[in-house]
Image (tube, rainbow, N blue to C red):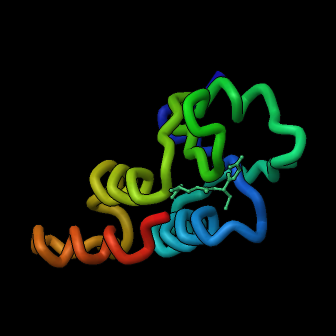
Amino acid sequence: MAGADDLKVLGMWTSPFVIRVRIVLNLKGLAYEYVEEDLGNKSALLLSSNPVHKTVPVLLHAGRPVNKSQIILQYIDKVWAGTGPAVLSRDPYERVVALFWPAG
Ligand SMILES: N[C@@H](CCC(=O)N[C@@H](CS)C(=O)NCC(=O)O)C(=O)O
């Protein structure tokens, strides 16, 4: 049974999208479980967590999936606003620029 702060990342070690999420979790000092996916043989957890795109990264927060690295970053920034450094600028324009450039 997942606790309120239970965090799990479904990833693949060479993925820049996954690395982006892991850097942010580490910057924030948030503990998480990392689960390496075989993208040639995706796990049932990945397929049920991200049934539309079936991609990594997926962040599971207390068992609830959040998909797509840009959306995950925004989620982490909001939920753990009081923990560690801010990840995204408070300025709306700077935020969209920061989210646009690394988008895939
Ligand atoms: N825009 C997505 C891109 C995610 C993505 O393309 N992930 C790749 C790994 S780098 C993936 O899971 N590929 C598996 C597939 O497309 O089946 C994000 O930012 O999360």
> Closest to the observer: 59 or 51?
51
Instruction: Where is residue 47? Give x, y as percent.
Output: 70, 29
Please, is residue 51 above or below residue 97 in the view? above
Q: How many badges with numbers are in the image?
A: 0
Please, is residue 79 above or below residue 22 in the view? above
- Which residue corresponds to the image point at 59% horizontal and 45% vertical from the top-left? 58
Quarter residue 81 falls in: bottom left
- Which residue corresponds to the image point at 76% horizontal and 59% vertical from the top-left? 12
> Closest to the observer: 82 or 100?
100
Quarter residue 98 falls in: bottom left
Instruction: Where is residue 102? Give x, y as percent.
Output: 44, 74
Q: Is residue 94 left or right of residue 41?
A: left
Q: Is residue 37 left or right of residue 62?
A: right
- Which residue corresponds to the image point at 45% horizontal and 68% vertical from the top-left? 28
Within the displayed image, which quadrant is ligand 1 positioned in? bottom right
Instruction: Where is residue 57? Give x, y as percent.
Output: 61, 52
Q: Is residue 81 left or right of residue 9?
A: left
Please, is residue 39 above or below residue 94 in the view? above
- Which residue corresponds to the image point at 66% horizontal and 21% vertical from the top-left? 1
Please, is residue 57 above or below residue 42 in the view? below
Q: Is residue 41 left or right of residue 17?
A: right
Instruction: Where is residue 18? Give x, y as percent.
Output: 62, 62
Quarter residue 63 falls in: top right
